[in-house]
Amino acid sequence: MRDWLKDLSSEDRKRIGEDIKTVEFGWPIGMPVCRPLGDGVYEVRTSLARNRIARALFYIDVKGRMVLLHGFMKKTQKTPGEDLELARSNKSRHQSGSNEGAAMNARKKRKKTDYSGSTFDSFLDEEGIREEVEATAIKRVLAWQLERAMHEQQKTKQVMAKQLRTSRSQLDRLLDPRNVSVTLDTMARAARAVGKRLIIRVADVKSKRV
């Protein structure tokens, strides 16, 4: 996975990173960013320049970690069988190396190899884009959650803007997934307007393998 990412342009790596982190922060999440492929394997889909689409396959292990299995460029509408099989094979190897589902006595008798690679966060750190990528992903998830709450409550943008005592254009910027220049106070007020509250906490990092 890391070698595949390294062969891409810096802009491609950034956009793929934003989508992967969006799935991590917003999990469980569905289309258009993510869809299931069966057997616990999922696909992150990223639209790139020149009408290209990148696909990153992953699974969620028993520790709740997002484990990246395989990446490739879309050439057909359907996920190629060979790419899916490779992802499933990598998933099995990771599970075997992590001792998932192994009997307790088997673990005591021998130490299995952990097939985990380095973390995706460390890759983003090496690229110098982790903070930017995570900021975009966090804002995207928050914007989607607000829009979903508005839809569920049948609340129009006009009504929402009035509650926030702001303009429609300001609300559009708030709901723009890629606009990260929004204050926490604004996000908190928007959350209250739909009967929610913004919760921010500092938590231990969950390693995501790449």
Image: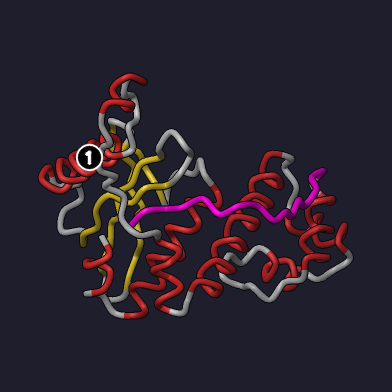
In the image, 156 versus 84, the foreground residue is 84
Q: Is residue 207 magenta?
A: yes
- Which residue appears at 76% of the width and 51% of the height? 199
Is residue 41 positioned above or below 121 on the image? above
Image coords of residue 104 (percent x, y): 36, 20
Specify few, some or many for label 1: CA neighbours under 10 Å numbering under 14, 14-19, or 20 or more: some
Is residue 2 positioned above or below 92 on the image? below
**Picture quarter containing residue 49?**
bottom left
Quadrant assignment for the C terminus: bottom left
Image coords of residue 85 (percent x, y): 15, 41
Residue at numbered disc 1: 93
**Picture quarter containing residue 98?**
top left
**Picture quarter containing residue 139?**
bottom right
Main SS, magenta region, reads: loop
- Which residue appears at 10% of the width and 45% of the height? 82
In the image, 120 versus 18, the foreground residue is 120
Magenta segment? 195-210
Quadrant assignment for the N terminus: bottom left
Asked whether, in this view, residue 178 is left or right of residue 80, the answer is right
Image coords of residue 44 (percent x, y): 36, 52
Q: Amino acid at mark 1?
A: Arg
Asked whether, in this view, residue 6 is left or right of residue 119, the answer is left
Count the labels in the image.
Answer: 1
Image coords of residue 79 (percent x, y): 19, 46
Asked whether, in this view, residue 106 is left or right of residue 78, the answer is right
Residue at the limit of the structure toward the left, as seen here: 82
In the image, 71 versus 148, the foreground residue is 71
Query: Secondary structure beneath disc 1?
Result: helix
- Which residue appears at 70% of the width and 44% of the height? 149
Q: Is residue 183 magenta?
A: no
- Which residue appears at 40% of the width and 61% of the height? 120
Is residue 178 positioned above or below 162 on the image? below
